[in-house]
Image (tube, rainbow, N blue to C red):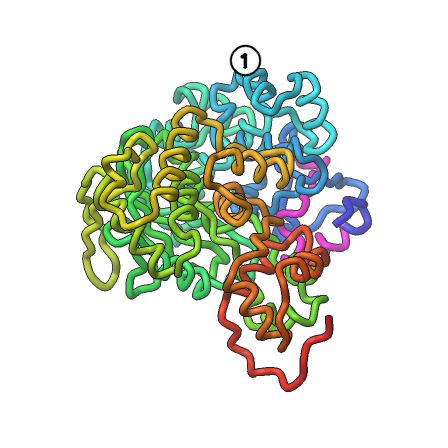
Amino acid sequence: MSLTPAACYRAVLARDPRHDGRFFTCVKTTGIYCRPICPARPPTLENCSFVPTAAAAQAAGYRPCLRCRPESSPDLDAWRGTSATVSRALKLIESGALDGGTDADVTSLANRLNIGDRHLRRLFAQHVGAAPVTVAQTRRVLLAKQLLHQTDLPMIDVALASGFGSVRRFNETFQHLYQRPPSDLRRRRRSNSATSVNNTEITLCLPYRPPYDWPAMLDFLRARAIAGMELVTDDDTYTRLIELAGQTGSLAVSHAPAQSALRVVVRFPNLSALPTIITRVRRMFDLSADPTAIANALAADPLLAPRIAAHPGLRLPGAWDPFEIAVRAVLGQQITLKSATQLVTQLVAATAPSKPTPVESDSSPHQLTHTFPRPEHLTATALAHLKIPKSRAATLLALATAAANDPHLFDPHPDLDQATARLRTIPGVGDWTAHYIAMRALGETDAFPHTDAALLRNVSTALQRPITPTQLLARANRWRPWRAYALLHCWTPNKTAARPTPIPA
């Protein structure tokens, strides 16, 4: 929405949840900033100013409200569509690019974006309302506040898990923002919050903007689950083993619809990895999407309207590890989903180190044994036993070499065309594979593998006439910039009754 004071104030008076995360209200008389749904008595309009991000509010000197808890606001990527460079920078900051908090980190980030650091700061001031370092600090503060409210971790572990370099710095920051120590915020913790069982197991609720089609997400992941590495349990929980920096842990993700959140149980030996884990989980389960805006844009096409009505909260499944998705895409070329999943399972069993880790669910215990292999594990010898064409094995080796040689291979790109062009430089990676990787690994919402056989078959059935890839690509122009969501709707089984008449072109 446009950040006009009158429009924002009307949303505040209505406490309209549809605008939660789209802007924050800075209250001049109290020095705090709130979500539009804050239960406190609304201030007068003349005492309010409105900003698009929490970082902008903190840069202006406001502190987070203790009642509406801005750290629980859904992340809607308010900057999307304003600057591709800022969007890429924010994704990198979420991944920890500025966790050092120094000017050298900002310079390094600017270099990764191929711009100067002064220009990067100007872009952030224009589109976010705060400097890059302030954005990173806000991210740390809000995560720390979430950990204080939702876990029983000791203060030193909260500081470490939220990215602060020391407890002293952690205490100073909270004293400055809240005029009280972090321990005082913990005493205000709600009694029904989730808690941690021990220092290596943490349970958090990650909010989203409703609706969320959790059954469809589970169906998608279940059909592609790699035996021994991931599974969907009987209690509708997705579990998998994860690896970061040579350390192994596990995730268990379930739905908490009453809280409009996903409940995530993280078991990992290194607490400092928690920000990275949360960022990956948010992207994997597409928690930053605005389903209402996407549905409104796509439902204008009569081809998609009944599908969106059947699945109004459909999300785009992302990736825990971009390299993993890239390997899956290559192995899935020109074969069925079932065959591709079997090949990936064989590859993982043959190449990944075995790391048995028990993963408990409410229904029964499960033994997960493998993490996904790193690029250096994919050798010609390791691939020799797979029943795949030599050309496909060569593509996997080229992909592994590219990923090993370029740690930024899967970094955000300025636009979709550049992202797919970079991927297509890898021998054996064509347009379908590049768009599939861009869609699931890079989070490109407009990626569209228009030659996909299942997509063409389902669209032809819906239209009641054959459609060519060229015709489909032309029709998909009306779906931009959400073509990836349109693809997912066309892939997802339509539970509505069959239509008696053809859909208009």
Numbered range of the magenta stretch:
8-31
Mark 1 burial class by Cα count in 10 Å: few <14, some 14-19, many 20+: few
For image coordinates 65% across by 70% down, the residue present is 303
Q: Does the magenta stretch include residue 30?
A: yes
Residue 470, given in percent of the width and then of the height, sits at 66, 58
Q: What is the quadrant of residue 243 in the picture?
A: top left
> Residue drawn 73% across and 46% down?
43
Q: Nearer the viewer, residue 57 or 302?
A: 302
Q: Is residue 68 positioned above or below 232 on the image?
A: above
Q: Name the residue under label 1.
A: 104
Occupied quadrant, residue 127: top right
Determine if the magenta segment contains residue 201: no
Q: In which quarter of the image is the C terminus?
A: bottom right
Asked whether the viewer can see residue 225, the reply is yes
Residue 315: percent from left, percent from top: 52, 57
Disc 1 is placed on an element classified as helix
Indicate left or right for 430 with 242 as reference: right
Question: Can residue 39 be seen by looking at this rendering?
Answer: no
Residue at (60% x, 25% y) in the render? 113
Depth check: 478 or 89 in front? 478
Q: Residue furthest front?
A: 390
Q: Position of residue 327 (x, y in %)?
A: 39, 43
In the image, taking residue 198 as reference, residue 193 lies left or right, namely: right
Above or below 165: residue 53 = below
Along the line of sight, which residue is nearer the eye, 67 or 378?
A: 378
Lateral position of residue 147 relative to residue 138, left or right: left
Q: In this view, does 209 lie above or below 384?
A: below
**Dot 1 amino acid type:** Ala
